[in-house]
Amino acid sequence: MAKTVVHLVVLCLFLFFPVASWAQEDEPVPAVLIADELFIENDRELIARGNVEAFQGTTHIEAKEIRYDRETGALTITGPIILQDGEGTTILASAADLDTTLQTGLLTSARMVLDQQLQLAAVQIQRVNGRYSQLYKTTVSSCKVCEDGKAPLWQIRAKRVVHDKEERQLYFDGAQFRILDIPVLYLPQLRLPDPTLERATGFLIPSLRTTSELGTGIKIPYFIALREDRDLTLTPYLSANTRTLEFRYRQAFVKGRIEFNGAISRDEIRPGEIRGYLFGAGSFALKNNFRLDFDVELTTDNAYLNNYSFSRKDRLDSAVTISRARRDEFISGTLIGFKSLRDADVNAELPTIVADGIYETRFFPSTLGGELRLDVNAHSHYRYSDEDIVGRDVGRFSTDVDWLRSWTLAYGLRTELTLGASADLFNVTQDSSVPQNQTQLSPHGTVAFRYPMSRSSSAGVSELLEPIVQLAWTGGDRLNVPNEESTRVEFDGGNLISLSRFPEPDRRERGRATAIGVNWARFDPNGLETSLTLGQVLRDEADDAFTITSGLTGTKSNYLIAGQIKTREHWSITARTLFDEGFDFTKAEIRGSYRHNRGSLAGSYVWLTEDPVEEREEKIAEVALAGVYNLSRSWTTSARWRYDLSLNRAARAGLGVRYSNECVSVNFSVSRNYATSRSLAPSTTLGLSIGLRGFSARKGTETYTRTCGK
């Protein structure tokens, strides 16, 4: 008889199968039986034979033959059997005796596969109410088991294993861990999460770590699922020279989340002291579309973060910000606390407490046309020092009102006009060299001309060429206030056409200035994109507030050249440089990256001239490289290197090797920090971690399958 799904099938099911056994909460669950042959023997036994498939709820079973005894309500199934519960569990068996719900019974010569990762082979499996599966004389592994007789890379053998489907846990009795069939560990009781569980209380992947300062040690993280919305991870770190407890706390809220990371240590680097750090961050959505963001960065001493490789930061900032961004309005208030870890810095003489407030809005007046902008900016910073000048505290309140309008004139010439005024109020204390309170009003205006031109070829390549000229003027004289906020100025394509290139309003460019430049871009439909910007700023009088490195000193600025070349999939190169008429460079940088299906490579080069005003007595030249290369499906290497060309020595280097297949993931890394200071010494760190797939090494989006013999 051909494979049949006929009305007779469903009729026989309801005639012979007790309705109660197929019901949940008095509602019958549809059952479907598909087979090559379907017949009844002795008026009591329904037999389905040949390519049999049965569906009951979410459970699906395939077998060679299924016999249903109407009197006993038992299903006798002849394999090979494939049973799937619709929730990631698959059972393969040679024979089975189950009830009509397919949830309770015994399967022999069986193998259970969880989430297509972890396989549990047993002499028999006993299913209880669809929740529990008891496996006897069991071998557990996520490695591919081949027919050549070779043992898998790792396996756990146990007298009995119980899988709790609801809690998604595996309980082992008499567990023996083996590597290449060699016993290495015995545990009378063991509990592990199954691979479908994302969060469960228990141990995570341990790692070995060796450093020249702390010696060889081990980290054993323990994850605690406090509730669905919060968890805590405790990581003891034990070595010859330290006793450390690391921790991480995370909690999710309806409208936000927080995370804190920290550690407490007693070590031989600073005997008798308790050392530690705390980093935290959070973000919350408030009423009326406001957002609250905060971060905390604290440490007990300057060297702790570097000694333990927690962070490379040498200046910490703890901040809280309340902000709101709308189409025509932006509001932000920020309070920041700074702490420098640099040996040369004296924190009491640095702006340690900083407050900023910003309000920006715009209107579109119908009578004037164009756009009207209002910008209110408040800033204050405080030093703990009480000494004159070095303990200076500054407060500033600035307001800018601008009217902007643009026109397109004949032949496509774009004209942009800006008229406005700025008002500034300064309050400087603990500095006898300047007045305490000063105010100023600065009218200003700009007019810019752009002439965009474009062309396209028959091949679809398009080019854009845009010459730009801007005439700018700012009235008034600069007040005698210290330069506290605009000590570092960047001159690039983003501020070439700007009224002022100082980053903050405590400094404004005064008098007349002309900016000239040209933008060029080329777009190829094959994916190649190229852009280039050239520019220079000319002014009536030099501004001594600009540093040498800024490239804006004198009445003529340095020439600015910035460009980018990138392809759709592989290459991306960005470069910028500043040089004068004698081709003396003040700044140069280039960054590039290359991506391939076998790996990636990224690098950068930075060169800065000496500049005493920016506290740089010598030139700086540094190159950095970082790359990843996949040697094969299993082997991946990574490397990073940073070299100080001005000092002719390496600053930092690292190498990593990763091996991964369907059952194990091994990571090894070595890094060297060459930095030296009063609080830091050169150090070398080695790390090793091993994860067993199916338990601790979650596969995420990564999939790996291996064929026997490969």
Image: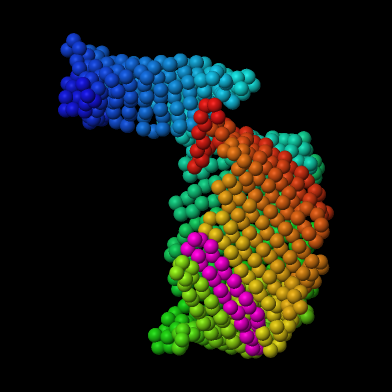
Rendered position, 606 above or below 699 = below
Please state which of residues 419 and 558 is positioned toward the viewer in this rendering. Answer: 558
State the count of labels. Answer: 0
Would residue 364 be found to the left or right of residue 587 on screen?
Answer: left
Q: Residue at x 65, y 88 (%)?
A: 511
Q: Quadrant of the image for the N terminus?
A: top left
Q: Is residue 503 visible?
A: no
Q: Which residues are magenta?
A: 508-537
Whole-percent x, y for residue 299 in the image: 70, 52
Q: Residue at x 61, y 50 (%)?
A: 600
Whole-percent x, y for residue 106 in the image: 38, 17
Q: Quadrant of the image for the C terminus?
A: top right
Would residue 669 be found to the left or right of residue 648 on screen?
Answer: left
Q: Is residue 280 magenta?
A: no
Please state which of residues 35 and 391 is positioned toward the viewer in this rendering. Answer: 35
Whole-percent x, y for residue 692 in the image: 57, 31
